[in-house]
Amino acid sequence: MLQSIINSLNTTLGPALPIFLFAVGCLLLLWGGHLLVKGAVTIARRMGVPILLIGLTVVAAGTSSPELAFNIFAAWKGNGTMCFGNIVGSNIANIGLVLGISALVGPLTVHSRLLRRELPWLIGITILMLVLAWLGPMFSYRGQLVSGFTRWEGLLLLALFCLILWFWVRESRKDASDPLVREAEETAIAEAVGTLLGAWFAFMLGLACLLAGGYLAKEGAVSFARQLGISEALIGLTIVAIATSLPEVITSWIACRKGYCDLAIGNVVGSNLFNILLVLGVTSVGWDIPMPVQWGWFDLFAMLAMTIILFPIALTNKQRITRIEGGMLLFAYVLYMTFSVLREYFPDWF
């Protein structure tokens, strides 16, 4: 049905169709993720799920739902390098763009003991992603033998996702007064809708919007890449990654305005963990996810570098990310995005 609508729009919009599809798809992804979280929070509360578990899992997973929906359709249609670019680009954007902007709004102070334990987890999981890409079997992608992520690696990532969730919730229950736990609980309560029927309607509508948005955004991104003559990996790394990271931008900005600094940082750390363990895990279980042959390793190490840099920035200077450090993160992100575009258009320079 969606494909027939796209075909009819093609005669009307012509060359502008890819931009239109991508914009509509991204709006549906954002709205769908928001509705999905609202519905899921209410349903979980009515089922007796502890508000702590809802705040630390359901709400956090909702910010990664656009990446998951987009990647499923991209992998299904054989655009695996765009999946890789979206995951790596989203994680870099979460640290450089989201935290950079949040720290410019106001200094971010880390009070949470739980959050100080999560940062090393994120570094370890990011290193694991590099190790899996290196140790994993080579496979054929569009006539080339490439490294990447296959089913057994996806199953391992999903198993680690369940283990970390269990450990996360167990540690949170030990310290219910932790600032991150308190802020996550208050956010989960605020996300709830009125009736159970309304919650199911919001959940199903959100799911439908995510599926439609993922398909439309993928179609628009692929067509846009072909129009510009650039690789799908670059589109995933830049435009798609920024678009699917908008929930993190909005959530962290709102958290900063409320004075929830731990939640703003925890949202980024949790989203990056979810992107690697859940999004890459689910996607690679269903389809082989290749790394770009030319710049894939560089992008992985850039993601690791940004993750490692976050650790001392967040836990030094009285455990505070200052406006200057936020500006540095944002500058590093802009510099990396500029380099990513230049290397594509002017390969002889590099």
Image: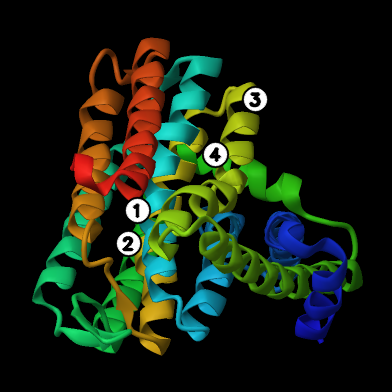
The front one of 29 and 223 is: 223
x%, y% of residue 165? 39, 64
Left or right, residue 170 beside residue 182 = left
Q: How far apart are marks 1 and 4 (CA)?
A: 13 Å
Q: How far apart are marks 4 and 3 (CA)?
A: 13 Å
Give the labeled residue for mark 4. 182
x%, y% of residue 105? 55, 17
Name the residue type under label 3. Answer: Lys
x%, y% of residue 275? 42, 61
Give the labeled residue for mark 3. 258
**The residue tagged with tag 2: helix, strand or loop?**
helix
Question: Residue 171 has which mark?
Answer: 1
Q: How crowded is mark 2: few (under 14 residues within 10 Å), some or many (20 or more)?
A: few
Give the labeled residue for mark 2. 167
Q: Earlier in the sequence, mark 2 or mark 4?
A: 2
Q: Can residue 111 be seen in this view?
A: no
Image point (69%, 69%), residue name: 216
**The residue tagged with tag 3: helix, strand or loop?**
loop
Image quadrant where residue 224 sits: bottom right
Q: Residues within 10 Å of mark 4 (few under 14, many from 20)?
A: many
**The residue tagged with tag 1: helix, strand or loop?**
helix
